[in-house]
Image (tube, helix red, strand yellow):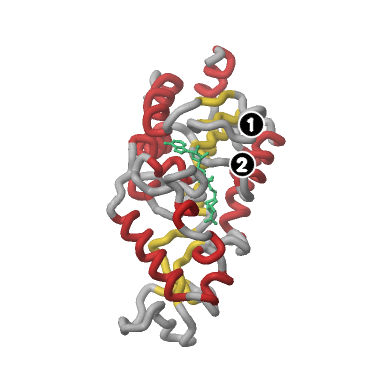
Amino acid sequence: MPKPLHDFLKQAQRIVVFTGAGLSAESGVPTFRDAQTSLWTWYSLEDLATPEGFVKNPRLVWEWHVWLRKLIDSAHPNPAHRVIAWMEELLPEVTVITQNVDGLHQRAGSQNIIELHGNIQRTRCFNEGYVVGDWEKTEEIPPKCSVCGGYLRPDVVWYNEAIPEDAWLAASHSVRHCEVFITIGSSGLVYPATELCNLALASNAKVIQINPRVTPLDAHASINLRGKAGQIMPKWVLEIWGGQI
Ligand code: OAD
């Protein structure tokens, strides 16, 4: 790493860590777009992760999310999740903005987290939108909301749905004011990744990318660290901030 960039990072006060599915790949949670191992290689996105798909076949969509939630429940945070939580304890201001719905940042100990795509552990009413903590257990799949009788659904953002406004406002504020934007495990191909990366660049943040593959951001990042997050992050964080840690 060039010394000026190293020195800049070491002094930085406000850091955003932006994460995508690749961060949890080493925890055994499949990504979306990696050939062979991705979620959409086996299933159709339109059928399983859109409001239209849910209306068409609510049982299929509910059961698929139950399957994914069980897989996530049996997964554990990997070294990259843990190092990100560690950064928050030791550096002045670290904000995690994640596209992941798996809650592994929380389980690793991060606290300052903005979830752009919701969390698969929560459930909400499909009709009215409010989060539901409990419901009557019947044979029905999906279960019904005890208030309005509509279907319940996972509290995640599907395609063709908007990111919750409070999450978006908080995320864009943090990115606009950060000095360093570290993007890890995101293909950067879809909104909001494209938007937040562009915002970081426009705000003159140093952009660091960690990904085993080339992405559209490669040409714009201050540095591209090629490899798996769980292997790169612990070494890299120690290299930069080791003196303070
Ligand atoms: P993608 O599946 O599009 O991209 C995963 C990225 O992680 C790829 O660029 C991989 O090269 C990289 N990757 C794989 N293994 C890695 C590892 N061990 N360490 C670091 N990087 C690794 O996932 P996202 O960019 O998160 O949205 O996708 C964005 C959104 O599209 C998701 O949140 C989801 C999806 O549709 C919704 O569900 C609304």
The residue most toward the top is 3
Q: Is mark 2 within 8 Å of ligand 1?
A: no
Residue at screen point 47% across, 51% down: 100
Residue 133 percent coordinates (x, y)? 38, 73
The outermost residue toward the right is 202
Residue at the disc numbered 2? 175
Q: CA distance from mark 2 to mark 1?
A: 8 Å
Q: Is residue 239 above or below residue 233?
A: above
Q: Amino acid at mark 2?
A: Val
Q: At 41% across and 77% down in the image, what residue appears?
A: 142
* Rendered view: 92 above or below 106: above
| Residue in view at x 46 percent, y 41 percent | 22
Mark 2 neighbour class, 10 Å CA radius: few under 14, some 14 to 19, many 20 or more: many
Q: Quadrant of the C terminus?
A: top left
As helix, strand or loop, the secondary structure at mark 2 comes to helix
CB contact under 8 Å: marks 2 and 1: yes
Mark earlier in primary sequence (2, 1)? 2
Corner quadrant of residue 194: top right
Residue designated by label 1: 205
Is 96 located above or below residue 50 in the figure? above
| Element marked by disc 1 | loop
- Measuring from the top left, give residue 149's x and y in whole percent: 46, 87
Q: Is residue 71 rendered to the left or right of residue 11?
A: left
